[in-house]
Amino acid sequence: MVAVRTCVACRKRAPRTALLRVVAHEGQLLADDRAVRPGRGAWVHPTAHCLNQAVARGVFSRALRVSGKLDAGPLENRLKTRMDN
C-alpha cells in the first residue's frame, strides 16, 4: 500500500514520494527530504508554483501549528538548488 499525502498548497493528493515534507525549526521552514525530523510536518509538491502559493496564502503556519510568520528563505533556496540539478 502506498502512503498518500495532501499538498498544503494545491490540496491535491499524491504519493508520499512525490511530495516534500517541510518542518518548522527556529522560525524557518526546512526541507525534510528523509522525513525523519521531529515535529509536525507539512507536505508540498517540490515545485516553485506550489511553494509560492503556500507561502503567499500562509498555509505553513496553519499546517505546522505555529504562530507568527515563518522564514521560507532556506526552503526556497533548497528547492531552487534541487530544480537546478
Image (spheres, rainbow, N blue to C red):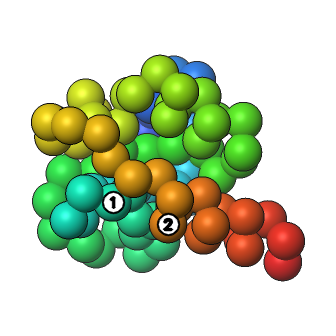
Q: Is residue 52 left or right of residue 75?
A: right
Residue farthest toward the right in the current orientation of the protein: 84
- Please tell me which residue lies in front, 70 or 48: 70
- Badge 2 marks a residue whose secondary structure is helix
Q: Residue at x 25, y 72 (%)?
A: 37
Q: Is residue 49 left or right of residue 36?
A: right
Q: Can you give x and y, in whole percent of width and height, for residue 45 in the image?
A: 61, 44
Q: Tags 2 and 1 in contact by the CB under 8 Å rule? A: yes
User: On the image, numbered disc 1 is attached to which residue?
Assistant: 28
- Badge 1 marks a residue whose secondary structure is strand
Q: Residue at x 28, y 74 (%)?
A: 36
Query: Where, by quadrant of the figure, is residue 81 drawn?
Result: bottom right
User: On the image, numbered disc 2 is attached to which residue?
Assistant: 74
At label 1, the amino acid type is: Gln
Q: Which mark is residue 60?
A: none
Query: Where, by quadrant of the figure, is residue 82 drawn?
Result: bottom right
Q: Can you give x and y, in whole percent of width and height, for residue 55 in the image?
A: 50, 35
- Please tell me which residue lies in front, 53 or 5: 53
At label 2, the amino acid type is: Pro
User: Is residue 18 something that shows in the picture?
Assistant: no
The answer for how far apart the CA atoms under marks 2 and 1 are is 7 Å
Q: Residue at x 32, y 47 (%)?
A: 70
